[in-house]
Amino acid sequence: MKKYLKRILLDIYEFTEKSGLCKIYEKILEEKIDKNKLPKHVGIIMDGNRRTAEIYGKEKYYGHYLGAKKAKEVLRWARDLGIKVVTLYSFSLENFNRPKEEVNVLMDLLEKEFYEAAEDEEIHKYRVRIKAIGRVHLLPKRVQRAIKYAEEKTKNYNNFFINVAVAYGGQQEIIDAVKKIAEKVKKGELNPKDIDKKTIDKHLYTADIPFPEPDLIIRTSGEERISNFLIWQSSYSELYFTDVYWPFFRRIDFLRAIREYQRRQRRFGR
């Protein structure tokens, strides 16, 4: 029965993609989006890759390849809509605990994607800056080299910003920031009495990116938690959860998230 339901889900997805119904609905949705009230920064927890592979009856790695392809599409949608910053949760520190073979596949994929992004004509045409955030030093040297290459090739761009959270954990980010601050206190460069929110902000991985606090965080696959993603920066983020697995995430799903964001009243505790 479970296998049968998965097949139905796949058939529905493929039908809506091919029938043109999505394009009609996209147009209706986009007309309802207020371009003057877009989120400046959108964080995305891309969940459901392995479950998508199961639906296709493939190895779970197949889902990661589909997920990487989908990420490129979504980044293009965000850029074309006018959103300034997107942060993708690509690989958490906890993901290192997955089977070694799967981790190796993910490392291969990260290396490939960073190198390809660095040479992508659209990245340079639209002046897109790429940055990795996380404990990058824990990644294989070959992946670190790919990241450095992409960051160097795009460091002078400022039209659109892509942050890739890799070897990332929100709690660990705060720990790393506290260590840096403690070192400054130890050296007499900082008085403990002067430590405030701005001090923490300046020592986070996101310190040098515009709009570091995401206005909207989207999570796919039906899970409703943020899983250690930007936990300091997301204090007042709007959260949007969808049942759609990441590789099946369509432009209408993205536009729905933006529309829902614009329907909410953001009070920031006031």
Image: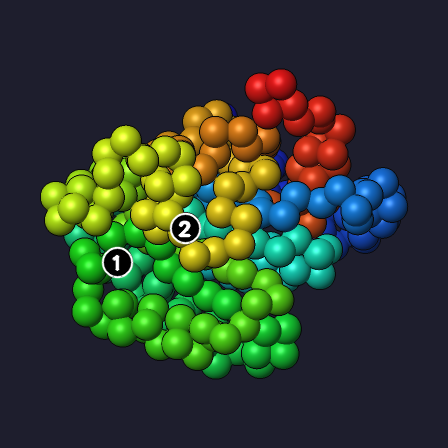
Here the colouring is rainbow
Tell me what residue is drawn at x 50 percent, y 67 percent.
Answer: 129
Is there any visible trace of residue 147 in the rendered image? Answer: yes
List the residue tagged with mark 2.
Answer: 206
Q: Residues within 10 Å of mark 2 (few under 14, many from 20)?
A: many
Question: Would you identify the image quadrant in which residue 38 lies?
Answer: top right
Q: Secondary structure at mark 1?
A: helix
> Compared with residue 147, is residue 172 higher up or lower down, i.e. above or below?
above
Give me the disc on residue 165: none
Give percent across and percent down for residue 20. Answer: 81, 53
Closer to the chain start, of discs 1 and 2, is 1
Describe residue 269's horizontal placement relative to residue 198 as left or right.
right
Give amino acid for label 2. Answer: Thr
Percent x, y for residue 169?
Answer: 30, 41
Vertical arrangement, residue 17 with respect to residue 155, above or below: above
On the rendered structure, is 212 left or right of 248? left
* Residue at the (35%, 77%) spot, across then down: 149
Viewer-side label of 1, 2: 2
Residue 182 rendering spot, x and y as whole percentages: 18, 41
| Amino acid residing under circle 1 | Val
Q: Residue at x 27, y 73 (%)?
A: 145
Which residue is labeled 1 in the image?
Answer: 136
Marks 1 and 2 sit apart, C-alpha to C-alpha, by 13 Å
Residue 67 appears in the picture as rendered: no
Disc 2 is placed on an element classified as loop
Q: Residue at x 49, y 47 (%)?
A: 212
Q: Quadrant of the C terminus?
A: top right
Category of crowding for the residue at label 1, using alpha-carbon neighbours closer than 10 angstroms: few (below 14), some (14–19), many (at least 20): some
Q: In screen coordinates, is 173 left or right of 219?
A: left
